[in-house]
Amino acid sequence: MDRMAIRSTIRFTCIAFIAYIAGYSFTWLWHEPTAMIGGLWAVISGLIVSEPATVKESIATARTRVTGSAIGCFFGAIYLLLIAFDPFTYALFIGISSLLCYLLNYGQHVKLAAITMSVVIVVSSVSDINPVKNAILRLLESCIGVGVGVLVSWLLDKVNHHFEQ
């Protein structure tokens, strides 16, 4: 196994553990029934931003992740405040929000916005959480994961540079 695979494995393991504990703990304070979703959502965000080769690229990915999450949380909350969930209106709203992203020059955020919107809609549909509270929690969990992902990547890069010298 090469050194890059070992480094990535260590990075992913650290991010998964730290982001899950942080996301779970944060969400547990505000809405205990969705605390596991909070941990999961933080891990997903952390892993997404840790994928690029450099910390600078991780920060750029972090910006995209947070922006896409914010857009998705906004549209997810709006959807739930206006419409009861059903597959047709859900898919239609994904399409409408995607089109709006493109029209407003946020095309690079469409996938993350659609994913986040889906999580917000589904979590609110299967639990008793208020849609606005749910959207805010999902955005903050995403930010927690992004922060953990960038921080762990930065720390491991520093450790790696130290041992290479």
Image (spheres, grey):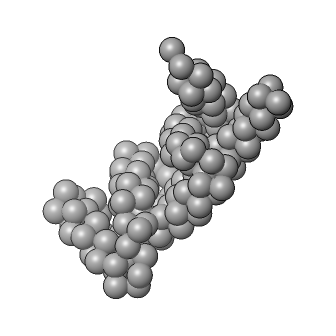
Residue 9 visible? The answer is: no
Left or right of 53, for residue 152: right
Q: In this view of the protein, which residue sits in the foreground, 52 or 104?
A: 52
Quarter of the image where the C terminus is located: top right
Q: Is residue 57 above or below residue 48?
A: below
Give how far across and how far down residue 30 sits, in percent: 66, 48
Rendered residue at 21%/58% (across/down)? 86
Compare residues 109 and 116 and report the one nearer the observer: 109
Give x and y (percent) for residue 60.
Answer: 59, 61
Judge left or right: residue 68 versus residue 142. Answer: left
* Residue situated furthest front in the rendering: 165
As drawn, which residue projects farthest toward the bottom?
Answer: 103
Q: Residue at 62% across / 26% down in the picture?
A: 7
Residue visible at 41% across and 68% down in the picture: 108
Q: Quadrant of residue 95?
A: bottom left
Residue placed at 34% from the left, 85% from the top?
103
Can the viewer see residue 108?
Answer: yes
Single out the residue that lies furthest toward the top. Answer: 1
Q: Position of residue 155 (x, y in %)?
A: 77, 38
Query: Percent position (x, y) of residue 101?
Result: 37, 76
Q: Is residue 144 above or below residue 84?
A: above
